[in-house]
Amino acid sequence: MILLKLTLRSLWNRRASLLLTVFSIAISIALLLGVEYIRKEAKASFLSTISGTDLVVGARSGPVQLLLYSVFRIGNATNNISWQSYQEIIGNPLVEWSVPLSLGDSHKGYRVLGTNQDYFRYYRYGDKQLLDFSAGQPFAGVYDAVLGAEVARKLGYKLGDNIVLAHGTASASFALHADKPFHVVGILKPTGTPIDRTVHVTLEGIEAIHVDWVSGVQVPGYHISAEEAVQKNLRPKLITAFLVGLKNRAAAFRVQREINEYQREPLLAALPGVALADLWQAIGMFETVLRIISGFVVVAGLLGMLTILLSTLNERRREMAILRAVGAHPRQVFLLFVLEALVLVVLGCLAGVTLVYAALFAARPWVVAEYGFYLRTWIPDMPNVLMLAVVAGLALLFSLIPGAIAYRRSLQDGLTVRV
Amino acid sequence: MNVIELQNLHYRWHSQIRDTLAIANLHVAQGEHLFIKGASGSGKTTLLNLLAGILTPTSGSLSILGQALHSMGSSARDRFRADHMGVIFQQFNLLPYLSVLENVQLPCHFSTRRKQQAGNTLVEANRLLDHLGLDADLRNRSVTDLSVGQQQRVAVARALIGNPELIIADEPTSALDTDTRDGFLDLLFREAEAQGSTILFVSHDPHIASHFPRVVDLREVNQP
């Protein structure tokens, strides 16, 4: 008991310099816990990029690739699906809804997605949330466009603006569909998913801008105006992929198998949850890297503490001699240093936890506004507690060094006060 | 019973060829305050550390209050020191982060015996400080606010609290001027006598010797 009292009083006496030590430990702890939090949130957010969809269907490739181009708008499809096959598959009585996706064009680097109004009715992300508009409404006309939050913000678009789509997905595409501009009728709220970076148009719109194109180039001398195009049959012949919602989720495997064994063309149906988890595994390396980095930061913080403890050894020789004179055993002198480190690291942990809460609290409104992502309140879980315990253990381990030096010195010095 | 009994005591530091300390015989009876005169390098520090139980003799016997210190383990020696000895240093006697009163009570935290003998340690600390003439308004202050003379008086109170039989003083007056020194010695004697403690006083200063009933020159008894 007296040792704890002596430790606390001694620490208080040196509070100015120790405050910095506690602060540096606190920052490293906050980083460690913050990284863990972000890692968990990022994973949760990633895994809920698409939710409520039972199957993603595309041309046969791999499930991860399918997910990448259909949901994340990364890369391109190897092949398309005929409208006929699409209709046939969604004719299955187990299918409750479906959303066709047609990709391949872009606008200033942002992918253009051709779809229909069911997209706004059925597409869910996060915690089964539907898409929400910050302005305007879903597209109705052939040349209407709905912008993702980031597209509107970065490019400064508002309702009523006209945009021109480019053929292909390269950001510096020269083949523009300049003759058939689209006008913005809706802007979505931020979702924290690739939807924010997508321009949504109707399937008919995609069809219309390509009526006078063959094999990716506009046919010379053959031009159909925007108005004329609308009069044509704009039913798409091909789509890139489609999303399926089933009446009964338990039927997912059955329907998946049926699609995978579809005779007319080679198709692939993927369970989004499984594919997302696979994809996370593939790109999840950064998790480990982040953890390793924050681990090193913690070690650096503790080394700072060790430095402080070691640097005070000399000025505390007198203190040790006094304690020895009143009957303290070298073991107790040793314990003083261990206790000191323990108090410092506990204070550092508490301050670090407070910092995490403060940072979350401060960042929440901004993150919601900017990324449409609600930062959930952080509740320390078992792994977090375990981490703090490991940090405390490491601090104790480090404190053995000054402790052992003080132990040896107090044996040698005894009552001799060497200053 | 003798407070201190040395017999054929030898101490040699590791890796040295000669003994630092070799004392054939030294007895100190209770109440027989002893002044040990020794210049630096005379083995004075080694002797003090041996008496306090910090070091153990290389050979020979060393008994304090009838207890054979040379055959005790280190923990037992620490406990023995806490129970039976009060130590006063040259200077810097006090822990800077404790108040004056807390410094005086410190030994009672390491020795149940002294705590019991002191009774209410706070009352006892105040009583001792009263006797030593330390103003009441200084007692809850930080020790760094005190003059060296005041600090040494606090050190005496700490050495005396809980009535230890042996007071070991290592040049406690060397930082004091002559007037303060004599006053300090008078106080030390008066309080030690009042509770029957034996003083073992080590100094190189021959002027102090006249205050003591018995004087030993370390150069004469230490014959390595």
Image (cartoon, rainbow, N blue to C red):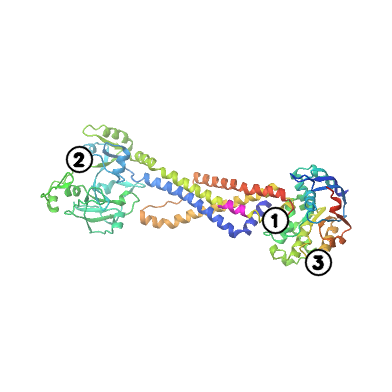
* Relative image position of residue B180 (x, y in whole percent): 80, 66
Residue type, mark 1 in image: Arg
List the residue tagged with mark 2.
A83
Density class for disc 3 (Cα within 10 Å; few <14, some 14-19, many ≥20) is few
The stretch drawn in magenta includes residue A189? no
Q: Position of residue B39 (x, y in %)?
A: 80, 56
Front in this rendered view, residue A12 or B22: B22
Q: Does label 2 lie on the same chain as label 1?
A: yes
Residue at 17 percent across and 49 percent down: it is A209
What is the chief secondary structure element of the magenta stretch?
helix
Q: Is residue A279 left or right of residue A349?
A: left
Task: Report how far apart the C-alphas of labels 1 and 2 lie in the structure.
Answer: 88 Å
Q: Residue furthest left?
A: A221
Q: In the shown orientation, is residue A153 left or right of residue B58?
A: left
Q: CA distance from mark 3 to mark 2?
A: 112 Å
Secondary element type, mark 2: helix
Residue B129, image x, y percentages: 77, 62
Which quarter shows the C terminus of chain A? Answer: bottom right
Q: Nearer the viewer, residue B51 or B80?
A: B51
Per the image, label 1 sits on a secondary structure element best described as helix
Give amino acid for label 2: Trp
Can residue A314 be seen in this snapshot?
yes
Q: Could you give the CA–CA distance between mark 1 and mark 3, rounded to whole angstroms?
A: 26 Å
Judging by the rendered image, the residue that carries numbered circle 3 is B178
Q: Which residues are magenta?
A: A304-311
Q: Are marks 3 and 2 on the same chain?
A: no
Residue B124 visible from this viewpoint: no
Residue at the image position 28 percent from the left and 55 percent from the top = A187
Is the residue under label 2 in contact with that under label 3 (CB below 8 Å)?
Answer: no
Q: Residue furthest front?
A: B17
Q: Which residue lies under the disc numbered 1? A: A318
